[in-house]
Image (cartoon, grey):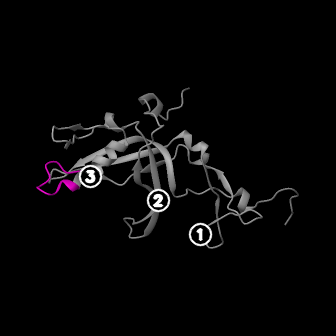
Amino acid sequence: MKELSGTTYDEATDGASPVMPGTYPAHVVGMTSRTFDSGSIVFNLTFRIAEEVSNMNIVKQVKNGSGAYETVVDSDNNPVEVSAAYMKGKTYFAQGVWLTPDPGKGQGWKNRKYKETCENLGISFNVNKEGVVILGEVEEEDIVGAPALVRLNEQEYTNRNGEQRTSFRVDNILPWKDGSKLSADELTDDVPF
């Protein structure tokens, strides 16, 4: 083999940065819903990591010999941090959020996550004279473009071939107080020519 001078590869500095579990600024870029025979509706949201992620640092991780990730440390054994800018523009699906219209007596708890998710996305519901929140069914224009802080975690699933796989999904949606809603123009990925 002919050795090339100056051509090197070090996994700690040159290795790809994997997606890391954590909380990131994002915007809703898609919503689908499905109504079931029971009347319950599941809302599935898609989030895109916002450009503000470039202002964050995360701990650098690299693959070890067994394919697992481990933290890169400096000469003083402190974790090395890198910019999270490489996460910008990546999209992730959230776990479905359910709305149960007219839940039975004592079953109102079924709508807690729906209420909290909508409120964390900046949606306000009306409140009656008794102080009870009157829920409404959100529509795409209510949600798409909304800012949020999303928590990503790796989750296992079984694919249609029966194989165990993992993927990153949004498992919590929190309010992003400094985030602003994106317009339809800002949501498109089309490159002008």
**Label 3 sits on what residue type?**
Arg
How far apart in space, not on screen, are marks 1 and 3 (Cα)? 37 Å
Closer to the camera: disc 2 or disc 3? 3
| Region of the chain picked out in magenta, as a range | 98-109
Q: In this view, does 75 lie above or below 91?
A: below
- Numbered mark located on residue 68 in the image: 1
Q: Of residues 158 and 186, which is closer to you in this image?
A: 186
Which residue reaches farthest bottom?
A: 66
How far apart in space, not on screen, are marks 2 and 3 (Cα)? 22 Å
Label 2 neighbour load within 10 Å: few <14, some 14-19, many 20+ = some
How far apart in space, not on screen, are marks 2 and 1 (Cα)? 16 Å
Q: Is residue 191 above or below residue 172?
A: above
Do the residues under discs 2 and 3 have CB atoms within 8 angstroms? no
Which residue reaches farthest front?
A: 130
Precedes in sequence: disc 2 or disc 1: 1
Element type where label 1 sits in the image: loop
Query: Which residue occupies 56% across, 48% down?
Result: 87
**Label 1 sits on what residue type?**
Ala
Q: Pointer 2: what residue?
A: 153
Please name the predominant secondary structure of the magenta segment in the image.
Answer: loop
- Numbered mark located on residue 112 in the image: 3
